[in-house]
Image (cartoon, grey):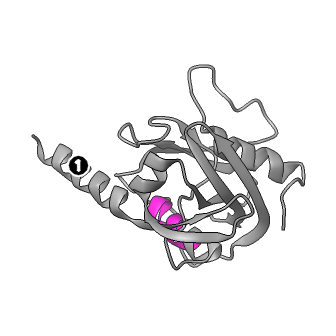
Amino acid sequence: MSVDSRKIDAYLARSAAEQVLSVDEQDQPLAQVSRAQVQSERLITRCTYIFVFNATGQLCLHQRTLHKRLYPGYWDVAAGGLVAAGESYLEGARRELAEELGVAGVDLHSHGRFFYDAPESRLWGAVFSCRWDGPIEMQPEEVLAVRWIDLDTDWRQDDERYTPDSLLALERWRAGQLLE
């Protein structure tokens, strides 16, 4: 086993053991559980979606690493991830943004929440946005590549796959269909 694969295995084990909050279909807390339990029992949890825009209005798009459990190699229109046990949505958004893209110390604008229910994932998602013109520092365990896109153009490429939950977050945000 190479050093890289040992690092990946250790990262995946830490990730599976992380404690998160399971919630019901109205986003009311139920219990503290591991991420592995969320996945194995199809529990509902909380997640953050942060749209990172630059001064010209372009959105930061990032590609997930190939060893991610959910949507490996897919392109994601939002930074973010599961909210840890004991965190608020805002605290989780700040942590995830710093971890994934190295973006810290920015004002996050809250836009509301939505419920996502798919065979592979059930969650309440809180949507945020920010402006960032500094460097992007990719977390090697989670982010493979980044690029900036103009949402007013035909930015999707036929040979790429995109995370359906973050596309839904973007669609609902742009349509003003998020819950308070």
For the question of whether residue 54 can be seen, the reply is no
Give coordinates of residue 173: x percent, y percent.
81, 53
Q: Residues within 10 Å of mark 1 (few under 14, many from 20)?
A: few
Which residue is most to the right? 176
Which residue is most to the left? 1
Give coordinates of residue 79: x percent, y percent.
57, 56
Q: Residue type at mark 1? A: Asp
Query: Is residue 34 toward the left or the right of residue 155 in the image?
Result: left
Query: Is residue 149 toward the left or the right of residue 17 in the image?
Result: right
Using the rendered view, name the quadrant where residue 112 is placed: bottom right
| Quadrant the N terminus occupies | top left
What residue do we see at 69% from left, 66% from top?
130
Q: Which residue is mark 1?
A: 9
Q: Secondary structure at mark 1?
A: helix
Judging depth in this view, the residue of 110 and 44 nearest the camera is 44
Q: Is residue 129 above or below residue 95?
A: above
Give coordinates of residue 134: x percent, y percent.
56, 65
Give coordinates of residue 139: x percent, y percent.
39, 57
What residue do we see at 64% from left, 75% from top?
90
Which residue is most to the top? 158
| Quadrant the C terminus occupies | bottom right
What residue do we see at 54% from left, 67% from top?
83
In magenta segment, residue 100:
yes
For the question of whether residue 4 can be seen, the reply is yes
What residue do we see at 60% from left, 34% from top?
162
Q: Is residue 167 above or below residue 82?
A: above
In magenta segment, residue 75:
no
Magenta span covers which residues? 94-102
Instruction: Considering the whole magenta stretch, tell me its main secondary structure.
Output: helix
The number of numbered discs placed on residues in the rendered structure image is 1
